[in-house]
Image (cartoon, rainbow, N blue to C red):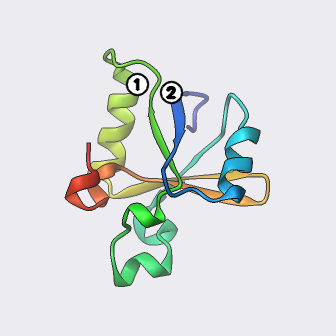
């Protein structure tokens, strides 16, 4: 994530994934480069009319371990406080990573 830093996350398929997402998840490299964008710049037009729901989520990215991770905590804090999203290009797909606070309450962690 810029400046050569990285955080360790594990991708988990949602219960509503499609075959394309399954194939993408199988091809993810151990390290995926992401770009920080303002949410206005990276947010899909379809989410402007209504917030994302669990129907829009194909992968959940969670810490690999439940122990405290200062780098991950700092990244989440920066993304939330600066209203940002993270974008990764994986093959021909664009993957947007955003904090769970942008999801409906029942899907927040």
Quadrant in the rendering for residue 84: bottom left
The residue under the point 29% across, 40% down is 77
Q: Quadrant of the N terminus?
A: top right
Q: Quadrant of the C terminus?
A: top left
Q: CA distance from mark 2 to mark 1?
A: 7 Å
Outermost residue on the front side: it is: 15
Above-or-below relation of 41 to 16: below
Q: Nearer the viewer, residue 5 or 61?
A: 61
From the image, tell me which residue sits under label 1: 71
Give the structural element (helix, strand or loop) at label 1: helix
Above-or-below relation of 18 to 28: below
For label 2, count other residues whose C-alpha is less than 10 Å away and answer few (under 14), some (14-19) or many (20+): some
Contact (Cβ within 8 Å) of mark 2 with mark 1:
yes
Give percent across and percent down for residue 73.
32, 30
Total numbered badges shown on the rendered structure: 2
Find residue 7 and name its label. 2
Outermost residue on the bottom side: it is: 49
Give percent across and percent down for residue 74.
34, 32
Q: Nearer the viewer, residue 65 or 73?
A: 65
The residue under the point 41% across, 76% down is 47
């Amino acid at each position: 994530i810029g400046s050569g830093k990285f955080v360790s996350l594990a991708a988990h398929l949602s219960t509503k994934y499609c075959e394309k997402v399954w194939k993408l998840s199988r091809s993810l490299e151990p390290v995926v480069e992401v770009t920080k964008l303002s949410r206005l710049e990276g947010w899909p037009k379809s989410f402007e009319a209504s917030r994302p729901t669990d129907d829009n989520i194909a992968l959940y990215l969670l810490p690999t371990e439940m122990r405290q991770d200062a780098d991950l905590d700092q990244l989440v804090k920066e993304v939330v406080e600066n209203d940002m999203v993270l974008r990764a290009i994986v093959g021909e797909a664009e993957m947007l990573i955003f904090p769970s606070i942008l999801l409906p309450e029942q899907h927040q962690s």
